[in-house]
């Protein structure tokens, strides 16, 4: 399957907030309560349709542990969208958002769409960060905000797709220069119904490209 | 808005390359490890986030190094302290023998007192040596602790450091390969997976060793506290025993000495009329002043400046000098009770009859307050119990924190001003600090001993 556009996403945030689980829920519609620690980065991909156009999301799920911070910084480059995730049951993950945001703004292009995500909304009884606080933070920093649960899949689709929509709108408005790959957007082969050389090249590839 | 699903790469190629043992791979691993070693050795700035992520480990290592260092310092301090005890005991014994031999030549009551005092000093000098046994024990325990526990932890620390270098090397490698990473390029992904596997293995081993080190250092600290608390309890008991016995003996002499003092005052009054004697008295008092000064400085120096060895010989000579002039004084003023009385009073005062000092406590204390800058040995010995308590305390401090330890022995005066009740609490605090589960019996005993002492 070919795509009209490819958007590069990165998922960032403290360790253990559920970044990998969000990705797994989005790509595989599964939830795994115990997840291996992400080493460096993992990848995921999924096709979505916006405005009748096939869009491939290439998602970079970065490691949240501090020792990988310098490494993950090199993954910001060329990302069109970012999911900044915190855990609503852990106040400290919310407190670190400013650092993450600074990091993201510093190492990515200025047009990158950032979606703030308060994950683990299913754990209402253990909530430490109010929804209003997340909203206020998003408003203050010009982000889109959403509370999700990778466990119940609540809002997961919406989080990824709304980000894509916003990027798509920016393309339509001409904010993104789609010919510059540094913006994290690639234009797919022009004939979506036929097998393009790119997709045949990707045939033996596991990461991300398997679906195309 | 319908999406078609792809799958993430997570579970397919994650472990593909983990067992890669090709020559190239080995060489690459070596290369990055060496690079990290070089960075470490040359002291080049390391990745701040990587360093920060090891903050807890580095804090534990700091504790470990402090334990290592302070144990060594404690050993040195114990050795010096032991030596000083020996010297002090020797001097005490010599003085005791001197008083006895001179007292036996004197058939008067003063002679008897001198003999009794001399006997008490000899006794105290013998008893003082008993302190060496628990100190020896402490020394041996710490030595064993160093050889066993510390060196074992040290080995783990070394293994951890090796593993840390490997892990950080792998991180460098990963950072390098991440610069141009494209998940849609097979070749790059293959390389990345290889490095990822390397990071994963080294991280696992490093995390395990990191945990080992943290646990071992925690245990090390706790076991040292335990060790100190146990061995120092024996020392405390011995010390209290020693002071209890000595103060009893001294108190007995003081009792007999009291009645003598009345005689002294009457004799003094009768003497006042005699010009010749008056002169002698003057001479004596000036001499005595000088001696007092000498006496003031020397024991203090000897007791406090644990540092210099050669100073000790000088002090001993000076003490000999004091003894000589005292002998001379004794000869000059041979038959008079008054002088013998004064001399022995000086010496009991100088050499730690706490009871005497307590009896004249009012004046001694005001003197202390007036003359804060000038530290008197009598003050020191006045509260000898408290002072000696600062010795193990300073030793523990040395164990805990060297800077505090350096302050403590040189400034015992700070503690001295405290009242006896405060002394007691300091004493308890010392052991409470060491061991929160400190033996309540030991405290009870300390209390009892102290009451005995102040009775």
Image: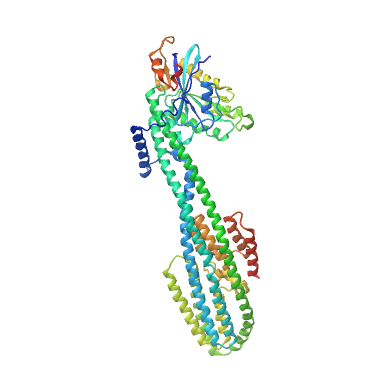
Q: Is residue B450 above or below residue A145?
A: below
Which image quarter: residue A146? top right
Query: Which of the two residues, A5 or B132, is positioned nearer the viewer here?
Result: B132
Specify whether residue A175 is in view: no
What percent of the width, then of the height, locates residue B189? 40, 25
Image point (50%, 59%), residue name: B141
Q: Is residue A44 above or below residue B208?
A: above
What percent of the width, then of the height, locates residue B45? 39, 41
What percent of the width, then of the height, locates residue A125? 64, 31
* Badge count: 0
Q: Is residue B417 above or below residue B184?
A: below
- Specify how the rendered protein is coloured: rainbow
Q: Quadrant of the N terminus of chain A?
A: top left
What percent of the width, then of the height, locates residue B76? 46, 61
Query: Which of the two residues, A60 or B260, is positioned nearer the viewer here?
Result: A60
Q: Is residue B28 above or below residue A180?
A: below
Using residue B185 as the reference point, say whether residue A26 is left or right of it. Answer: right
Specify whether residue A63 is in view: yes
Q: Quadrant of the C terminus of chain A?
A: top left
Using residue B208 as the reference point, say whether residue B233 is left or right of it. Answer: right
């Amino acid at each position: 399957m070919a795509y009209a556009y490819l958007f590069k996403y990165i998922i960032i945030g403290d360790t253990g907030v559920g970044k990998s689980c969000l990705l797994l829920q989005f790509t595989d519609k599964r939830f795994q309560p115990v997840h291996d620690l992400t080493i460096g980065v993992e990848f995921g991909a999924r096709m979505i349709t916006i405005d009748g156009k096939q869009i491939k999301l290439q998602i970079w799920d970065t490691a949240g542990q501090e020792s990988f911070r310098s490494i993950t910084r090199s993954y910001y480059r060329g990302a069109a969208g970012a999911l900044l995730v915190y855990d609503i049951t852990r106040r400290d993950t919310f407190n670190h958002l400013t650092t993450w945001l600074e990091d993201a703004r510093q190492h990515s292009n200025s047009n990158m769409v950032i979606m703030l995500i308060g994950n683990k909304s299913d754990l209402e009884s253990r909530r430490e960060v109010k929804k209003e606080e997340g909203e206020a933070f998003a408003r203050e920093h010009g982000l889109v905000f959403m509370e999700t649960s990778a466990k119940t899949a609540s809002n997961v689709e919406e989080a990824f797709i709304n980000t894509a929509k916003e990027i798509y709108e920016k393309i339509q408005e001409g904010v993104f220069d789609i010919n510059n790959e540094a913006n994290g957007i690639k234009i797919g082969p022009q004939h979506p119904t036929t097998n393009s050389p790119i997709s045949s090249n990707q045939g033996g590839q596991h990461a991300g490209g398997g679906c195309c | 808005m319908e999406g078609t699903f792809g799958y993430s790469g997570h579970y397919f190629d994650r472990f593909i390359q983990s067992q890669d043992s090709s020559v190239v791979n080995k060489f690459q691993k070596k290369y990055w490890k060496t690079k990290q070693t070089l960075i470490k050795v040359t002291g080049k700035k390391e990745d701040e986030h990587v360093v920060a992520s090891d903050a807890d480990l580095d804090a534990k290592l700091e504790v470990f190094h402090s334990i290592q260092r302070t144990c060594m310092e404690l050993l040195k301090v114990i050795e010096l302290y032991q030596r000083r005890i020996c010297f002090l005991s020797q001097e005490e014994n010599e003085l005791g023998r001197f008083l006895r031999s001179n007292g036996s030549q004197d058939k008067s009551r003063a002679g008897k007192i001198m003999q009794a005092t001399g006997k008490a000093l000899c006794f105290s000098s013998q008893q003082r040596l008993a302190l060496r046994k628990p100190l020896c024990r402490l020394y041996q325990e710490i030595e064993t602790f160093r050889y066993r526990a510390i060196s074992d932890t040290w080995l783990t620390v070394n293994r951890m450091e090796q593993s840390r270098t490997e892990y950080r090397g792998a991180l460098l490698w990963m950072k390098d390969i991440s610069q141009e990473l494209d998940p849609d390029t097979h070749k790059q992904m293959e390389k990345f997976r290889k490095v990822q596997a390397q990071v994963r293995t080294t991280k696992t081993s490093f995390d395990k060793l990191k945990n080992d080190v943290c646990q071992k250092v925690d245990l090390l600290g706790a076991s040292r506290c335990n060790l100190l608390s146990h061995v120092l309890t024996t020392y405390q008991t011995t010390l209290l025993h020693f002071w209890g016995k000595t103060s009893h003996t001294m108190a007995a002499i003081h009792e007999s000495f009291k009645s003598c003092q009345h005689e002294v005052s009457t004799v003094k009054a009768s003497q006042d009329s005699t010009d010749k004697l008056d002169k002698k008295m003057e001479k004596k008092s000036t001499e005595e002043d000088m001696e007092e000064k000498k006496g003031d400085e020397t024991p203090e120096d000897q007791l406090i400046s644990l540092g210099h060895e050669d100073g000790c010989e000088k002090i001993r000579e000076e003490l000999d000098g004091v003894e000589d002039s005292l002998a001379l004084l004794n000869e000059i003023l041979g038959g008079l009770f008054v002088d013998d009385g004064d001399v022995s009073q000086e010496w009991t005062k100088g050499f730690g009859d706490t009871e005497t000092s307590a009896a004249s406590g009012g004046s001694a204390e005001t003197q202390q307050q007036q003359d804060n800058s000038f530290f008197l040995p009598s003050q020191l010995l006045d509260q000898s119990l408290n002072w000696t308590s600062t010795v193990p305390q300073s030793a523990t401090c040395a164990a805990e924190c060297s800077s505090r330890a350096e302050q403590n022995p040189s400034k015992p005066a700070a503690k001295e001003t405290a009242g006896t009740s405060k002394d007691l609490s300091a004493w308890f605090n010392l052991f409470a600090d060491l061991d929160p589960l400190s033996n309540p019996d030991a405290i009870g005993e300390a209390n009892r001993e102290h009451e005995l002492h102040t009775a």
